[in-house]
Amino acid sequence: EDGSQLWLRYPVNPKSRNIVNSNSKSPTIEIAKKELNQHWSGQAVDLKIDRFPENFKDGYRIISTPKKITVSAKTDLGLLYGSYYLLNLQQQKADFSHLKLEEKPSYDVRILNHWDNLDGTIERGYAGHSLWKWEDLPGKISPRYEEYARANASIGINATVLNNVNASPNMLREDYLKKVKILADIFRPYGIKVYLSVNFSSPKVLGGLQNSDPLNQEVQKWWKDKAAEIYRLIPDFGGFLVKANSEGQPGPQDYGRTHADGANMMADVLKPYGGIVMWRAFVYSPSKEDRAKQAHLEFVPLDGKFRDNVIIQIKNGPIDFQPREAFNPLFGALRKTSEMVEFQITQEYLGQANHLVFLAPLFKETLDSDTFSDGKGSTIAKITDGTLRPAKLTAIAAVANIGEDKNWTGHHFAQANWYAFGRLAWNHNLTSEQIADEWIKMTFTDQKNFVNPVKEIMLTSRETAVDYMMPLGLHHIFAGGHHYGPEPWGDYKGGRPDWSPVYYHQADAAGLGFDRTKTGSNAVSQYFPPLNEIYGNIKTTPENLILWFHHVPWDYKMKDGKTLWEELCYKYESGVKGVRAYQKTWETVKPYVDAERFSEIQDKLKIQADDSVWWKDACLLYFQTFSKRPIPSDIEKPVHQLEDLKKIKLNMGHHN
Ligand code: BDP
């Protein structure tokens, strides 16, 4: 048992069956039929194309009697999704005698962003090398390409960006496009469209032009020809994802142009083919301005200037995928421009492939956040899914955690985060508990002595990680480079201040936290009323974000009567205790799980427990040098020395 089957553990019928009928024919329908004939053990199934309203998209309806099940949809892909959902329900031991349900997707484009490089490495990837074997393609085809497509289709993911947002211009070379074509051909019957990250300087670097100025006609022609070349190979190519003028990447501002100039140039060449541009709002420069404000400052003035096939891709928080961030104030602030959320499935800042952290609660927290942009109830979900702002196009993205490891994601439980993203992209009204429940039953077992305790671990795990890493709104206090462990003392003198932990926590003799109120950076002013007031006032700011918005005195009285310093100590302690409790719980489920996955997860929990103590000791000992207050006596004493912790240098590679 190596975990390679993911959640796709459908029983295999011993005898071949022929129980599926359909009024439609296509490679997609062939897949649906094959899956059901092999794995469905119930009554006969009718896959029926039917009339549904426009907004039903790739939705499906399932109606059953004890003799027959009818899956109906508007499209073949809808029928495939309905078929996978039947198998999903079978895994969960549903009753199929009188089923009646209807599902339609929350978002049009449900897309994974791979940060995979052409040399096979993956930026912030923790599950081995890239799945894409560029050197073998187009001749040699790994069976995992199709397995990948199948796994995604089974949860409704319908799009993928194959390469890193820090994109190599070579991605658009003719030989690479021919390789991409092969992947697109394999993914197509599973309903998955291919997109590429593009480097803004491609016309200059690859095409040998003088520059890549979006207003230069030669540059425009270069992109136009490139689009034509791509669509000749891949007629249903999805479009481009662009990281421009961010962290050293080239962009339109290199030529004094705006993000809109850059995005529109690409949008125009893709438009005739139905392609789109996902333009990232993750932009910041080492200026005096609070990094948390920069995306809003740059993009709000451009509202209304983007073509209708441009969608702005916005990270859930305004800094960078931290364990907890306030939501990004850009959501709702663009009224004439489509907006989409970017999440991170890969756990760059959440223990990578070592920590068990179930991310559905984090995703839900963002989607359910009320921005008040159009009055009460203007949640990020409703802004991005077209409910509040009838958008031509809706989308949701997440940075994938998939690599060539046997179990795909490094940690067996990290599979749940891929699954959770897909399920929420399909239906953002699902609860974290429903998703965990499904996933556990499909991936492990439906025995309640396993399901209940493991679900409890999953549902509390994100808050536990916040507690032992960055409680109360602390952020960006991880080690530079690899981003794995704690480094609150990090002060990269001579480098960019906005990459240094000390810039973010602002610890001093008076207190802790980043003042984003009027007396500080005034980032609170970017939120719609009443949030600007709520966050602007220390008394009304939710305590789980208090250090995000305020510089809080060490003796400040928290709601439970403890001082800030004490509260901080107890939070770290509670994170450590949480992981230890997971270890104990995991021992009790041993009888219900295979030996291999049991012990691999047991080993990872041990690392997580050790790491939680490392985080706690590093942060408390370091912050204590400012607070000068004792660690409460009922808290386990640090087992490390601060000076030793400062010497730890992990050899894990790369920049910032
Ligand atoms: C940060 C990563 C960096 C990415 C960047 C991005 O540390 O590797 O390139 O985000 O999203 O989280 O562009």
Image (cartoon, rainbow, N blue to C red):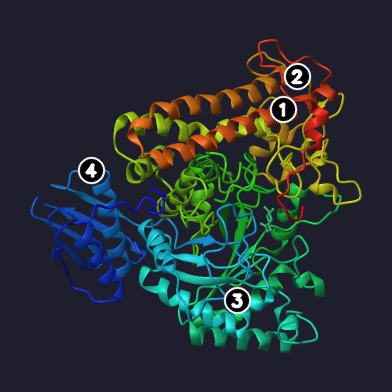
**Spatial distance from mark 2 to mark 1, Cα to Cα?**
10 Å
At label 2, which amino acid type do we have? Answer: Tyr
**Would you place residue 110 above or below residue 435 in this image?**
below
Type of amino acid at the residue the image marks with label 3: Ala
Query: Are there few (<14), some (14-19), or many (20+) residues within 10 Å of tag 3?
Result: many
The reply to whether dot 2 and dot 3 touch (C-beta < 8 Å) is no
The residue sitting at 70% across, 79% down in the picture is: 202
| Numbered badge on residue 310 | none
- Which of these two is toward me, 249 or 284? 249
**What residue is at 74 percent from the left and 39 percent from the top?**
477
Q: Nearer the viewer, mark 4 or mark 3?
A: 4
- Farthest left residue in view: 67
Query: Which of the numbered marks, if any, corresponds to residue 556?
Result: 2
Residue 331 as seen in the image, left or right of residue 43? right
Disc 1 marks a residue whose amino acid type is Ile
**Residue 598 x, y percent position in the rendering:** 42, 37
Residue at which label 4 appears: 93
Determine the residue positioned at 75% across, 43% down: 479
Residue positioned 74% across, 29% down in the render:
619
For disc 1, the marked residue is 538
Q: Which of marks 1 and 3 is nearer the N terminus?
A: 3
Task: Name the element at disc 3.
Answer: helix
- Residue 267 - label: 3
Q: How far apart are marks 4 and 3 (CA)?
A: 46 Å
Assess disc 1: are there few (<14), some (14-19) or many (≥20) residues with their C-alpha within 10 Å of its C-alpha: some
